[in-house]
């Protein structure tokens, strides 16, 4: 009787949980008895992945923000490395979270364990020399976007463009009418979806600005409605506390989960930078992307960040399709000014551009990623 395949896998946030869960599902088709363990979120755990720590502990963004949690993060990373050195998996897969996972991968690869990094770090945007560390740490990189593979090919490092699992999941022509019926939205209501992020720190930073922008729109648009999907119970409690204290002059309906359905039902979306911008694009919805960094992080990023854009629709198109607002530009009046025409005028031209980008990413990513991992295992 053969020993079941053992796969180490670590995801650092909600978007990684989605990608990892899709990969686990596809690998389980070939290896039903495979054992998955590491750090995962609810989607990974629902598929039987054993999580050594809560994924939320890794969900920290920003150079300065990480420093306040550095001791705990280092402890978790050291523990994970030792666990896999003591119990070597057949392959280790780090899903995004490069500052955490690349060091884990480096130590495990040095010990003779095959390693994969799923989601290329943003070497095309800043710290391009990291690509040499990535080469030393990994046997293979799985990239989500076509422009990333070109960078690895230039440096002759193994990389497979697998597409994005969200592009496979989201229908090419989302049924807005059905989603509005599901969420009990009246035909003539103008709906804004608010997505202030999946991390507690993001929500704390953005929620007041987003709600104030919604208040302005509420004063200008008849039959205006705001839906705010929350990723988990922690964010639900956090936002409910804020709304109880702030008492906004606009009705905001919280929805636990179902962010995709909310975006499909909406006329426009206001959201934090991140994977949600890709999902809004796939849902073919106009959007304003806003983010706020701590002062020092912002100054460092202005110096280090080389790309022209930071939202995924613009990065994929290599031009500005959607407004991007950072720090002082992300103020309620400016946000509301940009959103108002999105809520009240035809957006067909933008929708057709989103459609083309969707087609380029629709590659059956879960299966492509699983095939690449299996090929590596057999090599």
Image (cartoon, rainbow, N blue to C red):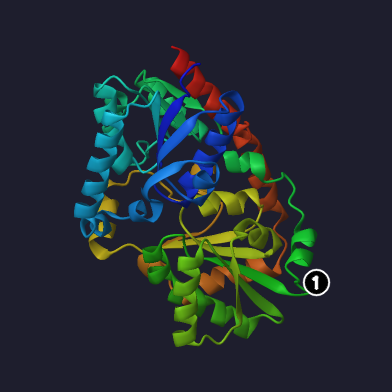
Residue drawn at 33 percent across, 43 percent down: 306
| Residue situated furthest front in the rendering | 1
In the foreground, 43 or 309: 43
* Residue 200 visible to the viewer: yes
Up/down of 328 relative to 316, above or below: below
Residue drawn at 24 percent across, 57 percent down: 69
| Residue situated furthest top in the rendering | 379
In the foreground, 249 or 104: 104
Up/down of 3 relative to 257, above or below: above
Report the side of 362 relative to 290 (left or right).
right
Q: Tell me the quarter of the picture where residue 153 sits.
A: top left
Q: Tell me the quarter of the picture where residue 109 sits.
A: top left
Up/down of 264 relative to 222, above or below: above
In the foreground, 32 or 273: 32
* Quadrant showing the C terminus: top left
Residue drawn at 26 percent across, 55 percent down: 66
Up/down of 199 relative to 106, above or below: below
Q: Which residue is mark 1?
A: 187
**Residue 321: where, in percent of width, then height?**
56, 51
Q: Residues within 10 Å of mark 1 (few under 14, many from 20)?
A: few
């Amino acid at each position: 009787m053969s020993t079941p395949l053992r796969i180490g896998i670590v995801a650092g946030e909600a978007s990684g949980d989605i990608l990892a869960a899709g990969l686990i599902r596809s690998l389980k088709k070939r290896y039903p008895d495979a054992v998955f363990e590491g750090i995962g979120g609810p989607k990974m755990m629902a598929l039987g992945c054993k999580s050594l720590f809560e994924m939320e502990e890794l969900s920290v963004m920003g150079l300065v923000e990480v420093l306040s949690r550095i001791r705990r993060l280092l402890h978790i990373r050291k523990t994970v490395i030792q666990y896999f050195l003591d119990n070597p998996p057949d392959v280790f897969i780090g899903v995004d979270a490069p500052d955490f996972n690349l060091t884990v991968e480096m130590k495990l690869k040095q010990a003779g364990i095959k390693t994969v990094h799923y989601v290329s770090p943003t070497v095309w945007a800043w710290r391009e020399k990291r690509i040499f560390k990535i080469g030393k740490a990994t046997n293979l990189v799985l990239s989500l976007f076509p422009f990333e593979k070109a960078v690895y090919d230039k440096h002759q490092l193994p990389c497979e463009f697998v597409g994005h699992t969200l592009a496979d999941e989201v229908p090419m022509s989302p049924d807005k009418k059905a989603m509005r019926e599901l969420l009990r939205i009246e035909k003539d209501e103008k709906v804004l979806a608010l997505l202030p992020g999946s991390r507690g720190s993001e929500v704390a930073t953005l929620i007041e600005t987003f709600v104030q922008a919604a208040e302005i729109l509420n004063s200008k648009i008849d039959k205006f409605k705001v839906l705010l999907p929350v990723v988990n119970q922690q964010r639900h409690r956090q936002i409910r506390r804020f709304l109880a204290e702030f008492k906004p002059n606009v009705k905001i309906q919280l929805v636990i989960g179902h962010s995709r359905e909310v975006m499909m039902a909406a006329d426009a979306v206001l959201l934090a930078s991140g994977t949600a911008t890709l999902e809004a694009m796939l849902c073919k919805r106009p959007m304003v992307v806003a983010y706020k960094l701590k002062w020092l992080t912002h100054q460092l990023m202005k110096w280090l960040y080389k790309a022209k854009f930071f939202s995924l629709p613009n990065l994929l198109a290599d031009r500005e399709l959607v407004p991007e607002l950072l720090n002082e530009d992300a103020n309620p009046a400016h946000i509301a000014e940009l959103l108002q025409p999105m809520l009240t005028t035809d957006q067909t031209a933008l929708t057709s551009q989103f459609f083309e980008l969707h087609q380029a990413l629709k590659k059956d990513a879960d299966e492509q990623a699983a095939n690449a991992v299996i090929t590596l295992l057999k090599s």
